[in-house]
């Protein structure tokens, strides 16, 4: 076989490989005009190599993030170094639809991109290559795993019956708020809430009714909160709230409004209406509060006094 024939064969194989590999391959000149557009790019864009050769990439694809991509390309031309664009930086550069059945939930193909400088025989960078990798499967799996982990994290922090924070997570909120007070002197109030005579509800109507009452109180409590507040189910029929940047007087306004709403409401259960009240204890942070345990203890003592004084009332710890 002659050298010419061998070279022609090698060129044929190379062209065949470029056209059939499962990655996108684009070559641009210094003015971003397309010199090569392989089969992968044709299949996903619907644009044939013959119709696009010599055309300007950014004029042909106005959806491309042109300013951002040109900046990346210029650094490749000037610094003569390749650069890599991850799907985590930008989900895609070319807006290709995703046709993979396994990852049908992704509308567009997630892509990793490599920008590669191409030198002439004299060593001058005259062209740039864009290599497009379809990483939809990897990206979707990672996003699904992230979503699942976030859901698990949420579940680990949430009380199943009320969808409020569970006791452990609420205590973390309380400790963070106390640390903020220690560092910046911010005032905050802690409220303990207990459903009055809850055992009688369970004894009279049954535990499912008791659960319904707890859910009802939690619902009214959630409606009363600001975004910065942190509420949790502290025990069986006991709730706890951290009211950030709130004085005892402001907390008392909050608790009295909540207490009256609960007192005036009714819980429907199996064609019966149940009415309950709550007692509430308040303790705001002061310079005398040594730690978060003392803060909590003060609110608990105030709640105990509210119970002792006839229930259905709010007491501020003195």
Image (cartoon, grey):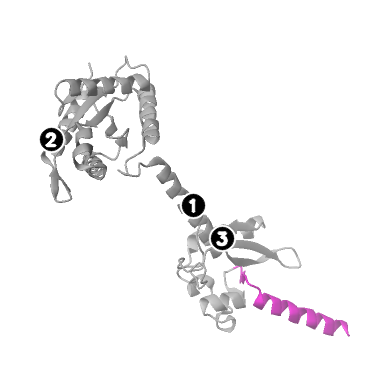
- Answer left or right for 249 relative to 39: left
Between marks 3 and 2 in the image, the one whose residue lies nearer the viewer: 2
The residues bearing labels 3 and 2 have C-alpha atoms spaced at a distance of 54 Å
Of labels 3 and 2, earlier in sequence is: 3
Q: Residue furthest right?
A: 1
* Mark 2: few/some/many CA within 10 Å (<14, 14-19, 20+): some
Identify the secondary structure beneath mark 1.
Answer: helix
Report which quarter residue 120 is drawn in.
bottom right
Residue shown at 51%/63% (left/top)? Answer: 92
**Image quadrant where one finds the N terminus:** bottom right
Residue linked to disc 1: 146
Between marks 2 and 1 in the image, the one whose residue lies nearer the viewer: 2
Q: Give residue 38's position: percent from left, percent from top.
A: 62, 76
Question: Is residue 47 placed above or below 125 in the rendered structure?
Answer: below
Of labels 3 and 1, earlier in sequence is: 3
Residue linked to disc 3: 138
Question: Is residue 55 placed above or below 92 in the rendered structure?
Answer: below
Q: Which mark is residue 260?
A: 2
- In magenta segment, residue 84: no
Q: Which residues are magenta?
A: 1-30
- In magenta segment, residue 6: yes
């Amino acid at each position: 076989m002659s050298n010419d024939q061998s070279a022609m064969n090698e060129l044929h194989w190379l062209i065949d490989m470029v056209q059939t590999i499962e990655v996108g391959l684009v070559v641009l000149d210094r003015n971003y005009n397309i010199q090569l557009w392989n089969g992968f790019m044709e299949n996903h864009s619907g644009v044939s190599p013959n119709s696009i050769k010599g055309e300007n990439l950014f004029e042909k694809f106005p959806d491309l993030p042109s300013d951002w991509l040109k900046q990346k390309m210029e650094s490749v031309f000037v610094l003569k170094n390749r650069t890599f664009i991850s799907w985590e930086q930008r989900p895609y550069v070319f807006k290709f639809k995703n046709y993979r059945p396994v990852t049908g939930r992704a509308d567009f193909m997630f892509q990793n991109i490599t920008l590669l400088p191409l030198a002439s025989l004299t060593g001058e960078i005259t062209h740039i290559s864009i290599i497009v990798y379809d990483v939809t499967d990897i990206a979707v799996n990672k996003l699904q795993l992230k979503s699942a982990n976030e859901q698990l994290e949420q579940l680990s922090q949430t009380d199943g019956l009320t969808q409020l924070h569970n006791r452990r997570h609420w205590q973390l909120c309380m400790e963070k708020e106390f640390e903020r007070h220690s560092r910046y002197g911010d005032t905050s109030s802690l409220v303990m809430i207990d459903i009055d005579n809850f055992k009688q509800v369970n004894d009279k109507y049954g535990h499912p009714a008791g659960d319904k009452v707890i859910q009802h109180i939690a619902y009214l409590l959630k409606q009363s909160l600001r975004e910065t507040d942190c509420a949790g189910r502290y025990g069986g029929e006991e709730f706890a709230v951290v009211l950030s940047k709130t004085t005892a007087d402001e907390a008392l306004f909050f608790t009295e409004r909540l207490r009256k709403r609960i007192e005036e409401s009714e819980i429907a259960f199996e064609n019966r209406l149940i009415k309950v009240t709550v007692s509430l204890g308040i303790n705001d942070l002061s310079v005398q509060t040594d730690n978060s345990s003392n803060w909590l203890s003060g609110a608990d003592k105030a709640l105990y006094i509210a119970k002792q004084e006839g229930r259905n009332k709010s007491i501020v710890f003195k």
